[in-house]
Amino acid sequence: MREKKTRNQIAPAIIFLLPGFTLLIVFFLGPLLYSFRISFFDWNFAHPDRSVYVGLQNYITQFKSQIFQRAVSNTVIYTVITVVVKMVLGFFVAVILNQKLSGRTGFRVAYYLPVITSWVIVSLLFTYMFSGMGGLVNYFLKDVLHVIDKNIMWLADSTLALVPVVLVDIWKGVGWAAVIFLAGLQSIPVELLEAAEVDGANRWQRLTGVMLPMMRGTLVFLLVVLVLGGLNAYVPFQLITRGNPMDQTHSILTLMYRATFSRMNFGSGAAISYLLTIFVFVLSVVQLKLLRKPAGE
Amino acid sequence: MKARFPFIILSVLIVMSIILGACAKVATPEAPADVTVAPNEVVVTEAPIAEPVTIKYWHTMSDAEAAKLNEVISAFESANAGISVQATRYAWSDFKTALLTAIAGGDVPDTVRMDIAWVSEFASQGALMQLDGFLPDFDAIAASVFPGPLSTNKWDGHYYGLPQNTNTQVLVYNKAAFEAAGIASAPATIEEFVADACALTDTAKGTYGFAEGGTYFWAPAPLFYAMGGKIVDDGITTATGYVNSAESVAAFTMLKDLYDKGCMSPNLLGGGIATDAGQGTGIYAMIIDGPWMVDIYKNNYPELQFEFALIPAGATGTSSVVGGEDVVILDGSKNKEAAAKWVSYLMSVEAQKALAQVGVIPTISSLAGDPDLPAHFGIFMEQLKTAQARVPSPKWSDMDNAINNAYQRILNGDQTPQEALDQAATEINALIAQ
């Protein structure tokens, strides 16, 4: 009787799993394994049978390439800065939006608007703002604040060119972090905060002693998701700097796209994406280990 | 159990429909309505094509060109019963990805009009048909066209395309700015060009005598070639003594001096005012650009009084860079004979003249000076006589990048022109050796 019931449950379960599983294999696992194979070849996309096996050559070339090293450091710097700033600003915006102030809904909408605006439009706007000739940023720095006496060619400098890239991501991402934080804040029972207040805790103590520990799950979620998003940065780099000047402002993914689709070097492109995959995988394991809830909680 | 059975059937049907849906052929956008679709199982037999076939033709034409193309297609179809042409238009920025996807997926268009710089890249992968020895009238067509554009189709001793249209860059100057500065005519030599560029610059007003669109090779190429610059030897075996030759170094030194003196706009390093917007609004007196500027200025800056002139001459005379598109037949085409007819037709005087009416410069050299062509074609066809093609190598994109980066290092003052181009030579040699 028991056995029969189990069998009856398994058949429909498999059938209901099939669509998702099929999609996973066709669109995810299959391509994943196929591109792993490509990464060991000088790949001929028109005649795959003419591809030449090159072993680890595609990987070694990347490790030796100064452009790849720079792309990795750009991606890491971009991730660290944007994640930290978005989390700090997002948290404070959430705390403010959690107060009972008039026009609260309006502010919430205002902070979330950048999140839903198009990356393309926003990236182009930032490109104009940071134009080296007649850009808004130079105008403010030179003609309004008088902190510089000569226009800065933002996009012509390999370090300064990353400023608009980082800023556009922060500007666009703060609202999203704030919404997630807001949800976390609202899940904290008011009684807890009131009790802390009655016990004589000041604002800072309530923040560090009650709010942050209660939002541990939210913090971990945001950290993991934002770090993953940062390492996969593509759009702002591609639209604002395109690797210029001198190929010093690529992200790992813009380099991968260029190798594959403009240089038609599929092997290199696959190798770059696998290096990123390994990096992300290792980092995720480390994050999970570090952020695992302490025993006894 | 019985009650669940219909659900199981339903689930299976849904799964099947998803899987089959995923495998289905993607609909082609912008297909003309009157196309006769050939059955999939059509096998092209020898000579007279019995069954009707459809030739797919992918391109990146402008609105006006695409409209004119429909007339060209109609003329071709009425002359070749049983063959219809289905043209599909792509945005330039998506085009290479679309082609790569089609080729990797095995469902290729029969014919493509592609950038001249791509032919050797695709040919080196075996994605294109060799046309010499296949196209019946190949030799006649090859003899009728400009040699520069034709050379862009050559890879490994054979031709994998034909030059469907061509263009080149000439000097575009603001007539009013020249008159205001008291300069009577366009600079004829590099020396005059340098002097004029600085005479037309007014730092106080923020105007520049000259501007380039960027540091990619296409931008400095006309002046570089006019001053005798070369990238590699004719056999594409080495860059040493070519990209870092005295002439090549002199060309980049001249540009660096203009930049340092403030006579060339800093926009070329990124984040500045684009050349067309700058010239249209009176900020840049001279730019170097192609025939499409006629339409751009007519639509966006109708007040601008601009003139064309040949690229200023260096020691060996004027020169410029060849641009344009080649028409190719893809290796995976199932209708190669019919495709060959379509390609031959596109290379005919009739088709070339039709598309010339919408601003496309024909490649047939005998059409130079033809009274039916737009008046401004004259200067471009004159410049084409001395214009040079970029290196026809599948590694060209990487070579271009090496020169681009060298140019940026020169402008930033990180390296002298000689040092930067020596490094570019080393990088290009490594690409050739691959």
Image: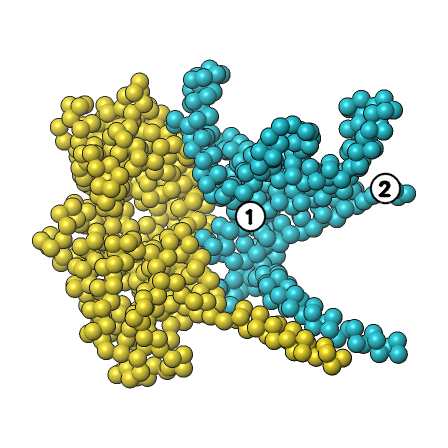
Chain colours: A cyan, B yellow
As displayed, is residue B203 above or below residue A3? above
How many numbered tags mark residues here?
A: 2
**Which percent across, then down, holds residue A180?**
67, 40
Chain to which the residue tagged by mark 1 belongs: A
How far apart are the alpha carbons under marks 1 and 2? 35 Å
User: Residue B346 is drawn in which quadrant?
Assistant: bottom left
| Amino acid, disc 1 | Leu
As displayed, is residue B243 above or below residue A150? below
As displayed, is residue A223 above or below residue B13? above
> What residue appears at the point 59 percent right and 63 percent down from the top-left corner?
A27
> What residue appears at the point 65 percent right and 31 percent down from the top-left corner?
A97
Q: Which mark is residue B91?
A: none
| Amino acid, disc 2 | Pro
As displayed, is residue A162 above or below residue B354? above
Q: Helix, strand, or loop for circle 1?
A: helix
Q: Earlier in the sequence, mark 1 or mark 2?
A: 1
Q: Helix, strand, or loop for circle 2?
A: loop
Which residue position holds label 1?
A: A253
**Left or right: B70 with respect to A91?**
left
> What residue appears at the point 29 percent right and 53 percent down from the top-left corner?
B62
Which residue position holds label 2?
A: A294
Chain to which the residue tagged by mark 2 belongs: A
Crowd band around label 1 with a 10 angstrom C-alpha radius: few (<14), some (14–19), many (20+): many
**Which percent across, then down, holds residue B27?**
43, 67
**Left or right: B18 with respect to B139?**
right
Depth order, front residue of B129/A153: A153
**Which percent across, then down, holds residue B290?**
25, 44
**Which percent across, then down, holds residue B286?**
25, 33
Depth order, front residue of B154/B113: B113
Crowd band around label 2 with a 10 angstrom C-alpha radius: few (<14), some (14–19), many (20+): few
User: Residue A189 is drawn in which quadrant?
Assistant: top right
